[in-house]
Amino acid sequence: MFGKQKKVEEPVVEEKKEKLTPAYLRDDYPYKAVGEALDVGEVQDGVVYEIWCDKCQMSIRSKGQNIRAQWERLKDSGCIGCGNKELVIRKVDMSGAAEK
């Protein structure tokens, strides 16, 4: 009771790891957005598009009708990351995708 004291374990401190770059921002990512910025009226169903913010590099990708709905939500409020209202829609090159 009086002779032995319990050892207090020190908490394990994790080393800081490097912040990983998202796959879609890497140079070897096969599905890049291509071409000029499009108007929402040019969006076709069944084609993958990206809404992109050049300030914070936020990217939302979806197909035709879904990207229109996202655009309608974001056009007045701006980017969900930084509030930038100069968002663009670009087509995503899916030629590297495996065909079913």
Image (cartoon, grey):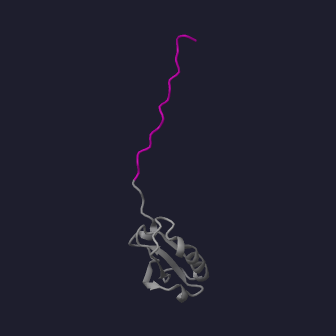
Asked whether 76 or 11 is in front, the reply is 76
The residue drawn where x is 50% and y is 86% is: 39
Residue 97 position, x and y percent, is 52, 79
The residue drawn where x is 40% and y is 69% is: 55
| Residue 6 in the figure: left or right of residue 65 | left
Asked whether 44 or 14 is in front, the reply is 44
Q: In this view, does 7 lie above or below 94?
A: above
> What quarter of the picture does the C terminus occupy?
bottom right
Asked whether 53 or 98 is in front, the reply is 53
Which residues, given as a range, are shown in magenta?
1-17
Residue 26 position, x and y percent, is 40, 69
Residue 1 location, quadrant = top right
Q: Residue furthest top?
A: 2
Residue 56 position, x and y percent, is 42, 67
Asked whether 63 or 56 is in front, the reply is 56
Q: In this view, does 16 lie above or below 6?
A: below
Dominant secondary structure of the magenta stretch?
loop
